[in-house]
Image (cartoon, rainbow, N blue to C red):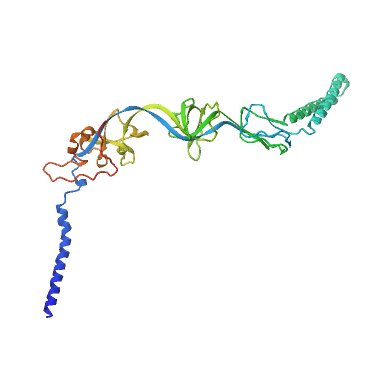
Amino acid sequence: MRAIPLLTALLVALAFGLWIFGLGAGPAETAQNLPPPADAAPKDQPVSVVVRRSQAESVRDVIILRGRTEAFRKVEVMAETSGRVISRPLRSGAQVAEGDSLCRIDPGERQAALEEAQARLEDARIRNDAATKLGDYAAETTRLAARAALNSAVYAVRTAELELQRLDIRAPFDGLLETDTAELGSLLQPGALCATVIALDPIKLVGFVPESRVGRLHAGAPAGARLIDGREVTGTITFLSRSADETTRTFRVEITVPNPRWEIRDGLTAEIGIPLAPRQGHLLPQRVLTLDDRGRMGVRVAEDGVARFVPVTVIRDAPEGLWLDGLPATAEVIITGQEYVSDGRALDVSYEAAAGGPDAAAAPAPGPAPAPEASPAPPAAPDPQATPAAPVQ
């Protein structure tokens, strides 16, 4: 009775051992039956790619900046003397002309001080005339003292007159009041604010240009902007900074725009566009961009049946793709399969028109083409970011 369970245990152990050894040998046998990976294909084996024959076109480059509107003039009008305000205030938003009175200060004893200075001037003038008429009979020191007293009296009269003129604080230019003027009865000291005046016609658009593109701008060039509320305005560049901002390494640019009705306010966000001279470029899908071993951005082209990397720069983007510079006038750009080839690799080219036509189903997929009289290798896995080529419209 005991021999049967022992025999059963031995059989189970033998079967388990054979199963383990079978698993160990299975992957090796399975690997022998798998086709070689795409990377193991011979270097001289052509790679199937889809190519677009692109022709250069004239494209206008535009520098897009994020900026703001800024008042052409803005000044805080300050008091130059002390005193109590005796004029009624003007409210913010009021329109003022150059020379309009903004704040009037109580003259106090200033008129009396002027009359006293004028009297002293008359006395000094008489004394000076008398010393002059005496000529050689008067001492030299007497004549010099009389002249000095006359000059001092003239200075005192001028000072008293200026003090009276400073009592009436006037607008320095045509504009709008950004703040109320000083309230009636308030006490102003030298340097105290009477009002803030801004001029909005014309108005400035201010932006900052990167150092890589500032060399393509110049004063007098046309420019435009779209304001935050959708309005579009045009003007000309009137100022281009010669010194870069130390933090952002950008250069300030100012564009002057007419604003006769003062509809454009100070401080609005604006998207500024500055057109540049036309350039030759190719309109290609964004997916064609790739990097070479040195980290340069570019595209791969087909030349004489082999792949070649060409560095490019982006002129601007468009809804259909990117405008690229750096390619010759006519270029055969690889638009599908560029990630699976390197410089000098042989290509099996299918043009985009053929790829989108009736025979598109028969077109080989991107990857190594099958070598004659050899077991076919599976095509390389397609790029998940790539999209199938579309027929040319």
User: Is residue 134 positioned above or below 289 on the image?
Assistant: above
Q: Residue 258: where, in percent of width, then height?
A: 52, 26
Query: Where is residue 75 shown, x and y percent of the image?
Result: 62, 33
- Direction right: furthest residue: 137
x 66%, y 33%: residue: 90
382 vs 111, left or right, is: left
Is residue 210 at least partly visible in the picture? no
Q: Between 120 and 147, which is closer to the camera in this rendering? A: 120
- Where is 259 relative to 210, above or below? above
Number of dots carrying numbers = 0
Residue 255 seen in this snapshot: yes
Depth order, front residue of 247/236: 236
Quarter of the image with the N terminus in it: bottom left
Residue 64 placement: quadrant: top left
Picture residue at 88% right of the left edge, 20% below the top: 137
Residue 375 picture location, percent across and down: 13, 46
Residue drawn at the location 83% of the way across and 29% of the way down: 116
Occupied quadrant, residue 30? bottom left
On-image quarter of the C terminus: top left
* Residue 158 left/right relative to 28: right
Q: Say left or right for 146 vs 102.
A: right
Spot occupied by residue 310 in the image (x, y as percentages of width and height): 30, 35
